[in-house]
């Protein structure tokens, strides 16, 4: 009845010539300058006397993005206000028909939808319209147009919602101003999180805040109270600066990190967010491999700065130390055998499985593909076929673990240090070369496929009923792979990791790490052939040694891992080093949460160690001395001495096992 009388009164005024002409005003999201306030609680846009406020529905929900189109998320609240008069109609210009349909469902019967527009007709009794909850899902908008009746002279309405200084981050201190477009309205505010009333503090002058604060305000006149305006101001430390010449580099890039006065910066080079427990930033960092640098600063009062992040990429074509070779398409599964080195390639795309293990899938690298072969580059992951745990299956060994299908509900392709049935695959290949590679564990999504993923290609495991793009297997053509030359320094020790089979040169001894004790790692000699993807420790006199490519293979197990390119390792590990003339495996010096493993070098993952020794600072070498009793530990002396390669030496200058007067002697 009230609405009818009001409408009738408006009709009489119009007939009598006293009805004000309606006015249209548009609020557009095309220009980010229209966003006048932002906080973790809400965002505000204002233009042409129209104000839109988007409030979070809970402490965990998102607020709207402010770039065109503006995005308003499910369960959030939208308030449209007109400071110039009372609203008779609102037209929401949604970004698509789907968003318009979703918005109409949230508004209900008061709205009509046509294409990407939603129209709401109002009775002209209020200056605001509220959508209390976007219940149907996300909505995107390009603009909205409000039709309103300007206020008549002397007409008194409730005040519009006050405007606060835009929320966000500040350093040190800041002033917060509160204003209201309704003339004569008084403003009251709180800073303790409670909603203000007329009994709250009256706003007289700008507020000075020096710590993280949420300010709430209302405007009051004789007609009543406005809605509550909210803004949160978060104190932070000054943002540190990262400067560099180029993010994509050839050999290395020097990065300068500058912390503001009164702050200390910390950094990581892995996916972990830096804290005060992370490494302090030096003046400069020299990066030699792909890395994601994250920097944060803390001031003297313990406030943290916003996180600064920069990704650095080394050009793949310029990564040194990794041979380039060819791989040939496999068209018959019977051509595959344990020990073969293969590459997984997208059948219909020029992408191969890369060495990049992502959080839940494997990366892809572009390759040159001919009719029946590919040219491998430095980023391609070469896999060694090993016997699966189940009959008729293979496992794919990467050098630091086995590929496996990781989930029954997600499309995961991961790497695990040890074998299990999720990483045992059946391989079937049709005469065109398309390979069906499926995990023997029927409880997981196990079909290896390629997904172009809108320009971010990847390899993952899928349900066969929801397959993506097919893959093929290519066998590495050993004859095209270059021999590898290893330089051994005067220390007499090195590590080596190659993704193809090589013959061990004369006068060189290679050891695999087979197990770890409380303070030492057991080394077992490898004879003749070093199999692909096998990480070893090398002992030889100073000089260069050529490891020739061979088609021969061998069965060798090593608990060490390696990389074919310069790569930052984001997990704890041990690297070969000489400290105080003692050669051993030492805990890698944590550098931004990672350590650099150079191309074709090996390291020992801490995860391969028993839990009791995973925090050991160093591991001594313990050589496999099966059948030899009474091995003694002595210092070097003048005796008839041979090393394990049969070379006569003058002294036992390095730790290891020597033949002294016909007996084995260990030197630590």
Image: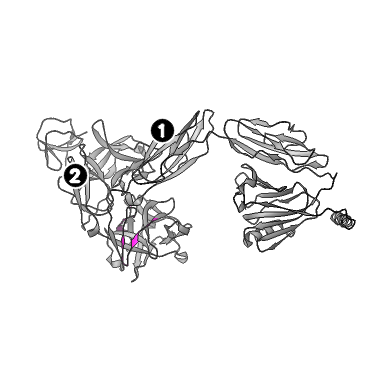
Q: Indicate which disc residue 316 carries.
A: none
The tally of labels here is 2
Write the residue at 62% across / 60% down.
96
Quadrant where the C terminus sits is top left
Residue 256 on image: x %, y %? 42, 36
Q: Residue furthest bottom?
A: 431
Instruction: Indicate the position of residue 81 as horizontal and vertical percent values.
Output: 73, 48
Residue designated by label 1: 283
Which region is colored magenta? Answer: 364-390
Residue nearer the viewer, 576 or 124: 124
Q: Is residue 426 visible?
A: yes
Q: Is residue 614 left or right of residue 506?
A: right
Check the image and report above or below for 45 versus 262: below
Q: Position of residue 606 (x, y in %)?
A: 35, 41
> Which of pointers 1 and 2 indicates the residue nearer the eye?
1
375 part of magenta stretch: yes
Q: Quadrant of residue 186?
A: top right
Which residue bears the numbered disc 2?
A: 544
Looking at the rendered image, the quarter that the N terminus falls into is bottom right
Residue at horizontal 66 percent and vertical 64 percent from the top: 115
- Picture coordinates of residue 452, whole percent (x, y): 44, 60
Mark closer to the chain start, 1 or 2: 1
């Amino acid at each position: 009845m009230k609405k009818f009388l009001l409408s009738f009164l408006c009709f009489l005024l119009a007939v009598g010539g006293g009805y004000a002409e309606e006015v249209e005003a548009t609020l557009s999201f095309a220009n980010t300058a229209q966003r006048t306030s932002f906080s973790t609680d809400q965002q505000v846009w204002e233009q042409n006397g129209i104000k839109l406020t988007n409030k979070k529905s809970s402490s965990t929900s998102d607020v709207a993005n402010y770039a065109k189109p503006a995005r308003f998320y499910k369960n959030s609240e939208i308030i449209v206000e007109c400071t110039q008069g009372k609203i008779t109609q609102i037209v929401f210009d949604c970004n698509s028909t789907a968003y318009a349909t979703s918005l109409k469902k949230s508004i209900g019967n008061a709205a009509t939808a046509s294409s990407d527009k939603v129209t709401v007709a109002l009775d002209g009794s209020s200056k605001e319209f509220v959508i209390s909850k976007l219940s149907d899902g996300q909505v995107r908008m390009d603009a909205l147009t409000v039709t309103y009746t300007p206020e008549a002279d002397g007409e008194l309405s409730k005040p519009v919602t006050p405007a606060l200084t835009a929320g966000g981050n500040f350093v040190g201190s800041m002033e917060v101003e509160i204003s209201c477009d309704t003339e004569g309205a008084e403003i009251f505010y709180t800073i303790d999180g409670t909603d203000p009333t007329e009994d709250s503090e009256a706003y007289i002058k700008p507020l000075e805040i020096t710590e993280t604060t949420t300010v709430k305000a209302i405007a009051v006149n004789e007609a009543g109270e406005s809605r509550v305006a909210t803004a949160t101001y978060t104190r932070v430390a000054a943002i540190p600066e990262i400067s560099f010449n180029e993010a994509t580099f050839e050999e290395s890039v020097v990065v300068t990190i500058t912390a503001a006065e009164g702050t200390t910066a910390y950094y990581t080079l892995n996916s972990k967010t830096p804290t005060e427990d992370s490494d302090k930033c030096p003046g400069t960092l020299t990066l030699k491999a792909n890395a994601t640098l994250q920097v944060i600063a803390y001031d003297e009062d313990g406030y943290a700065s916003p996180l600064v992040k920069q990704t650095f990429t080394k050009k793949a074509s310029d990564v040194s130390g990794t041979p380039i070779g060819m791989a040939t398409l496999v068209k018959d599964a019977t051509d595959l055998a344990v020990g073969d080195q293969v590459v997984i390639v997208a059948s219909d795309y020029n992408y191969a499985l890369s060495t990049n293990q992502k959080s839940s899938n494997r990366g892809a690298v572009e390759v040159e593909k001919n009719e029946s072969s590919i040219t491998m580059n430095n980023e391609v992951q070469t896999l060694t076929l090993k016997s699966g745990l189940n009959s008729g299956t293979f496992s794919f060994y990467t050098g630091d673990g086995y590929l496996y299908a990781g989930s029954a509900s997600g499309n995961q392709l991961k790497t695990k240090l040890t074998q299990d049935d999720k990483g045992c695959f059946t391989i079937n290949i049709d005469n065109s070369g398309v390979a069906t590679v499926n995990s023997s564990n029927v409880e997981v999504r196990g079909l290896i496929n390629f997904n172009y993923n809108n320009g971010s290609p990847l390899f993952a495991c899928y349900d066969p009923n929801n397959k993506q793009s097919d893959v093929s297997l290519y066998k590495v053509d050993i004859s095209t792979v270059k021999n590898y030359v290893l330089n051994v320094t005067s220390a007499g020790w090195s590590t080596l990791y190659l993704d193809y089979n090589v013959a061990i040169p004369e006068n060189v001894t290679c050891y695999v790490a087979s197990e770890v004790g409380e303070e030492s790692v057991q080394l077992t000699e490898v004879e003749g052939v070093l199999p692909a993807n096998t990480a070893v420790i090398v002992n030889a006199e100073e000089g260069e040694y050529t490891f020739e490519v061979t088609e021969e293979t061998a069965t060798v197990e090593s608990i060490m891992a390696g990389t074919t390119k310069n790569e930052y390792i984001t997990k704890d590990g041990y690297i070969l080093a000489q400290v105080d003339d003692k050669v051993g495996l030492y805990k890698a010096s944590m550098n931004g949460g990672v350590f650099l493993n150079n191309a074709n070098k090996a390291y020992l993952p801490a995860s391969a160690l028993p839990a009791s020794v995973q925090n050991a600072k160093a591991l001594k070498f313990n050589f496999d001395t099966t059948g030899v009793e009474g091995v003694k530990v002595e210092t070097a002396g003048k005796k008839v001495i041979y090393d394990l390669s049969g070379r006569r030496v003058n002294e036992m200058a390095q730790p290891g096992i020597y033949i002294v007067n016909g007996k084995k002697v260990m030197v630590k």
